[in-house]
Image (tube, rainbow, N blue to C red):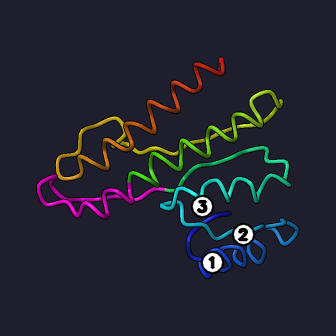
């Protein structure tokens, strides 16, 4: 499991092991995917593991009209929702496209198929996730 906040990851790990299955080996990694280099570092750190399913579920939102947007927040959102997702997906596909039984799951949003007035930038970033993932599936013959 990966997230920025190690304390939340440790809490979730504890919940999984105490309430779901104590035999599950949960590995936690702290990474800020709004920093491009950390996407590469994360992936390279995990190369020692055989990863059957890679799930990109990181995402940020910005709920404001375009004229009122906080551009720093929008830039961060785009790096997480688009850039890091693309980097991690590409690296995973390079290593696992020909490995039987492996899966890449990119989590979009209902807003990845709709225009959300008041959240246009978020909606557009999720459109990207949907289009990228669907196009990748066609490339891979899925």
Which mark sits nearer the N-terminus, 2 or 1?
1
The magenta region covers: 59-77
Taking the view exactly as shown, the residue that stands out farthest to the front is: 37
Q: Which mark is residue 6?
A: 1
Labels 2 & 1 near each other (Cβ < 8 A): yes
Which mark sits nearer the N-terminus, 1 or 3?
1
How far apart are the two marked residues, 3 and 2, measured between alpha carbons?
Answer: 15 Å
Residue sitting at x 45%, y 45% = 82
Residue sitting at x 83%, y 65% = 24
In the rendered image, which residue does mark 3 sit on? 38
Image position, residue 45 (x, y; %): 76, 59
Q: Nearer the viewer, residue 1 or 32?
A: 32
In which quadrant of the rendered view does residue 11 lie? bottom right
- Discs 1/3, front: 3
In magenta stretch: residue 44? no
Image position, residue 85 (x, y; %): 53, 46
Describe the element under mark 2 as helix, strand or loop: loop
Describe the element under mark 3 as helix, strand or loop: helix
Image position, residue 99 (x, y; %): 83, 31
In the rendered image, which residue does mark 2 sit on? 28
- Residue 136 in the image: above or below residue 33: above
Callout 2: few (<14), some (14-19), or many (20+) C-alpha neighbours within 10 Å? some
How far apart are the two marked residues, 1 and 3, measured between alpha carbons?
Answer: 15 Å
């Amino acid at each position: 499991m990966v997230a920025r906040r190690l304390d939340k990851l440790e809490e979730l790990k504890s919940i999984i092991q105490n309430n779901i299955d104590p035999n599950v080996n949960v590995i936690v990694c702290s990474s800020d995917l709004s920093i491009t280099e950390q996407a590469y570092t994360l992936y390279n750190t995990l190369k020692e593991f055989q990863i059957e399913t890679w799930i990109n579920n990181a995402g940020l939102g910005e709920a404001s009209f375009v004229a009122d947007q906080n551009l720093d927040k929008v830039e961060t959102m785009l790096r997480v929702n688009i850039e890091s997702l693309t980097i991690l997906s590409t690296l995973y596909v390079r290593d696992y496209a020909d490995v039987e039984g492996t899966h890449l799951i990119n989590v979009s949003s209902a807003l990845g198929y709709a225009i959300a007035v008041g959240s246009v930038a978020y909606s557009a970033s999720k459109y990207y996730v949907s289009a990228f993932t669907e196009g990748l599936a066609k490339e891979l013959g899925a």
